[in-house]
Image (tube, rainbow, N blue to C red):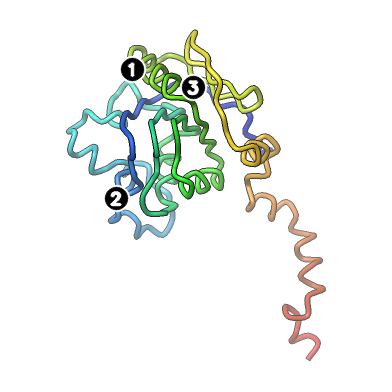
């Protein structure tokens, strides 16, 4: 089983607006959860209530979308890891935006959700195309660093370190630990502070 993420393809969901913070992505009252299971249904909960069914995450045409398209400074605010978890649990597998808050971006990498950036024209054009045709195919290619939205294509960018982690599958730190469990045990057996009772 591989954890490589080289390409994400599917329908898209446009979320227009700058400075959408983590408090809006997942309101504080949902942070008391023990696991992240079921968190997706509460993504953007207060915004969705305020828009009474007109929020993109509620619209029928965007259900099952895999690629979220946002604008500037997405994920700003408090550093809650529940924010990318809620988006991922809703079904999003990649995010295209003009820019991302640094901690939000890091939290996305940690759970295998690539966040790629495009210029304003690329992002707005993608949002417009998805709005006009919610079934249009959107592809984020981390090998060629291109986004394809119907007949429209444009370059995207991502920090090289994060890109290499996705392409190689090394973003999954827990998966690496499990895969290397024998080496972990062997190393632990040599550490006196772990095995002090056996040597006392």
Q: Which mark is residue 164?
A: none
Q: Is residue 1 visible?
A: no
Mark 3, secondary structure of its residue: strand
Q: Residues within 10 Å of mark 1 (few under 14, many from 20)?
A: some
Q: Residues within 10 Å of mark 2 (few under 14, many from 20)?
A: some
Circle 2 residue: 27
Judging depth in this view, the residue of 128 and 119 nearest the camera is 119
Q: Is residue 197 above or below residue 132?
A: below
Q: Residue at x 56, y 41 (%)?
A: 112
Point out residue 143 in the picture as x, y percentages from the top left corner: 66, 26
The span from disc 1 to disc 3 (Cα, nearest Å) is 15 Å
Circle 3 residue: 10
Q: Residues within 10 Å of mark 3 (few under 14, many from 20)?
A: some
Judging depth in this view, the residue of 75 and 200 nearest the camera is 75
Point out residue 124 in the picture as x, y percentages from the top left corner: 38, 21
| Residue 75 quadrant | top left
Q: Are marks 2 and 3 in contact (CB under 8 Å)?
A: no
Q: Which mark is residue 131?
A: 1
Point out residue 170 in the picture as x, y percentages from the top left corner: 68, 44
Q: Residue at x 35, y 47 (%)?
A: 22
Mark 1, secondary structure of its residue: helix
Q: Residue at x 56, y 29 (%)?
A: 157
The span from disc 1 to disc 2 (Cα, nearest Å) is 26 Å
């Amino acid at each position: 089983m591989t954890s490589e993420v080289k390409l994400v393809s599917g329908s898209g969901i446009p979320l227009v607006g700058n400075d959408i913070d983590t408090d809006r992505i997942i309101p504080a009252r949902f942070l008391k959860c023990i696991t992240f299971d079921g968190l997706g249904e509460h993504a953007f909960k207060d915004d969705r209530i305020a828009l009474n069914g007109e929020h993109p995450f509620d619209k029928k045409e965007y259900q099952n979308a895999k690629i979220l398209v946002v604008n500037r400074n997405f994920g700003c605010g408090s550093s809650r890891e529940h924010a990318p978890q809620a988006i991922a649990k809703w079904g999003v597998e990649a995010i295209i935006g003009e820019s991302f808050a640094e901690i939000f971006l890091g939290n996305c990498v940690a759970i295998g959700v690539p966040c790629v950036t495009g210029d304003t024209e690329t992002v707005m054009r993608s949002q417009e195309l998805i709005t006009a045709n919610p079934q249009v195919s959107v592809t984020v290619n981390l090998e060629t660093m291109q986004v394809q939205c119907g007949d429209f294509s444009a370059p995207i960018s991502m920090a090289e370190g994060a890109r290499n982690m996705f392409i190689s599958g090394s973003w999954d730190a827990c998966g690496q630990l499990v895969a290397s469990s024998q080496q972990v045990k062997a190393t632990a057996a040599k550490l006196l502070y772990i095995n002090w009772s056996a040597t006392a």
